[in-house]
Amino acid sequence: MLGHYLMFDGDCSEALDLYVQAFDATLEEKMTYGDMPPNPDFPIRDEDRGLVLNSRLGIDGQEIMCADSSRGAAPGENMYVSFTTTDKERALKAWGMLAQGGAVYMDLAPSFFAELHGSLRDRYGVNWMFTVMR
């Protein structure tokens, strides 16, 4: 499944409220950084616990995913194409090809919510987020 993933710089909750009202949208899911299981490799500051880790917004039968970026989100660089699949081999093939000549933001690795998850910018400047569901 391909979708859109919008990254925000600390104001994702505010943006979600606006989009729900503007588009008569449905907030399908909203998880904060504080909802994550503790991980010493990814410590969360107390002031960041309320930031949005992941959300899904339904607009006219389509889905947009949104989050607050842990590394900031500059305008023009804050949108990702999201590839979600249960086919691990397909994801690994595409990841390997897109990573060549690109920049990996987050290694494609196991996470608490998916078998594998990661993000990169391909050599053409397009941001991609990969999720392999269990």
Image: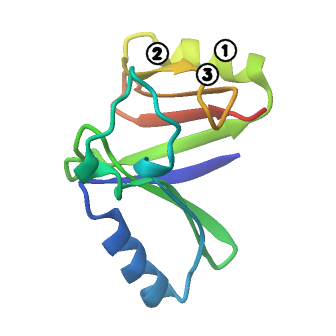
47 or 5: which is nearer to us?
47
Image disc number at residue 110 = 3
Q: Is residue 32 visible?
A: yes
Q: Position of residue 115 (x, y in %)?
A: 70, 26
Asked whether 82 or 123 is in front, the reply is 82
* Crowd tier of the residue under label 1, counting other residues whose Cα lies within 10 Å: few below 14, some 14–19, many 20 or above: few
Q: Quadrant of the C terminus?
A: top right
What residue did someone put label 1 on? 93
Q: Is 114 situated above or below 95? A: below
**Mark 2 secondary-structure assignment:** helix
**In percent of the image, x 19 and y 47: which residue is there?**
74
Q: Which mark is residue 99?
A: 2
Residue 43 % position (x, y): 33, 31
In the rendered structure, which disc, 2 or 1, sits on the residue that comes first in sequence? 1
Callout 3 amino acid: Pro
Q: Which amino acid type is marked by label 2?
A: Ala
Q: Locate residue 77 relative to residue 61 in the image: left or right.
A: left
Q: Does the image show residue 76? A: no
User: Tags 2 and 1 in contact by the CB under 8 Å rule?
Assistant: no
- Residue 39 in picture, x, y percent from top left: 45, 27
Within 10 Å of disc 3 (Cα), the crowding (few <14, some 14-19, many 20+) is few
Residue at image position (61%, 33%) is 112
Label 3: which secondary element: loop
